[in-house]
Structure formats: structure tokens, C-alpha cells
Amino acid sequence: MLELSALGLLQREPLHGYRLKQKLELFMSSCISVNYGAIYPLLKRLEQRGQIATIAEEAGDAGCPRKIYAITDKGRELWRKKMVDHPQESWVNSGSRFQIKFFFFGDLEPAERLKLLEHRLRVCYIRQDYIESLKSEYPLTDEYQLASGDRCNSVLSLEIQWLTEQLAKEKSDRAILQPHQQNTWEIPSRLRGTLGSKDSAKV
């Protein structure tokens, strides 16, 4: 997930490692652990693979130069692949991954956003059914367990509601845009013979 996040931020603008860490902490600290011990090896690995490139250096606070990295076409290709992939992972990690993906929804095509929202909503319903199926087999026995179970159910229900709203909004926005995208005018066949090639080109 750190790779997905770093490539997504570098796709927006070139950054040096320290600024990248700051942005990761600001936007994604609730989803992933952010530390220098992971960021700099990642940047080195991405550069070796040709997915990012050093485009400049600037003086750091301690006098050491800071490399400024920019994403390459190869890096954008990897980022997009990671955005649409659904790896097998725990429920907790899948939730964190989706939150990171949603942060970068503005960089995806409408159809890609719809697919990701539909997939996450489907996964949430499956999770809800699974939890419900376990209630009789593993009953909660005291007020704290019951309160904890209620909170988990509430969080899941709220996510389902939020995803449903986002999906409806995405479909509504797409429906508004589609008529404009399809508004291409062609010369009626009865007029094509009356227009010269120069006039046809202007149309």
C-alpha cells in the first residue's frame, strides 16, 4: 500500500523524500505506517526499476542534498495496475487499501471508479452476511462484547451507506456527462455532395 500511495502522490507532483513523508502522514497515516525506514528503500527500488526518476536536487536542512523524484510512464502504468487490482488480504487491510484508492479517484476514469465502488460495496455486504452467520455459533456474553459488536456492525453499516451514496453520485455525474460526450454532429448525407472539401474540413 505504501508503493500505491507514493506513486499516487508523485503522479500529482515531483517530491523529495521528506516532503513525500509529510504528505503520506497527512493524508494516509490512518491507513498505513509511515516511516523513513520504509520510504527511502522504496524510492530507491522504484528508481532502480525505472518507475520514478531523479529530476533535480536541492539543499536539505542539514546540508545534505535532497533528490526530487518524478514518476515515469512506467511508474504510472504500475500505479494504475495497483489501483484496479484486488489482492487477497485481510478485511482490515482491504479497507485501508480502498481508502487510499478513493483518495486518488480523481485520477481515474469514471468507469474505473464505478467498478471500484461496486467491488467494495459487494465485499462489505459479504462481510456483513458473514458476521451475521457467526452470531449463533459464537454468542457474545457480556455488555462489553455486545457494545463492541454493535460498534463493529455500526461502522460496517455506515460504510455501506456511504458507498451506496458515492455510487449513486458517480452514476448521476456520469449520466450528466454522457450526453455532452456523445454530442458529435455529422453532416447529413443529403448535404455532403453540396459542400466542397475545404468547407467539409471546417465543419
Image (cartoon, grey):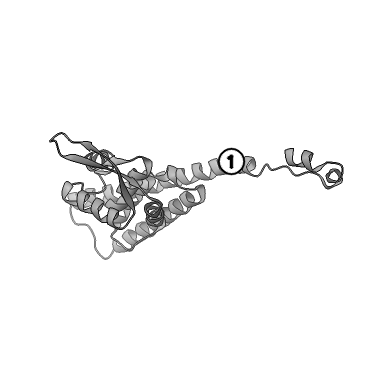
The C terminus: image quadrant: top right
Q: Position of residue 168 (x, y in %)?
A: 50, 44
- Write the residue at 77% across / 40% down: 198
| Amino acid of disc 1 | Leu
- Can you see residue 153? no
State whether residue 18 appears in this view.
yes
Q: Quadrant of residue 91?
A: bottom left
* Depth order, front residue of 95/186: 186
Measuring from the top left, give residue 176's x and y in whole percent.
Answer: 59, 39
Give the residue furthest to the bottom.
137
User: Residue furthest toward the top?
Assistant: 61
Along the line of sight, the residue nearer the viewer: 65 or 75: 65
Q: Is residue 95 left or right of residue 170?
A: left
Circle 1 residues within 10 Å: few <14, some 14–19, many ≥20: few
Count of numbered circles in the view: 1
Which residue does the numbered mark 1 point to in the structure image? Answer: 177
59 to the left or right of 197 = left
**Residue drawn where x is 24% and y is 63% of the image:** 138
Q: Quadrant of residue 180?
A: top right
Residue 144 location, x and y as percent?
Answer: 18, 49
Left/right placement of residue 67 relative to residue 193 reads left
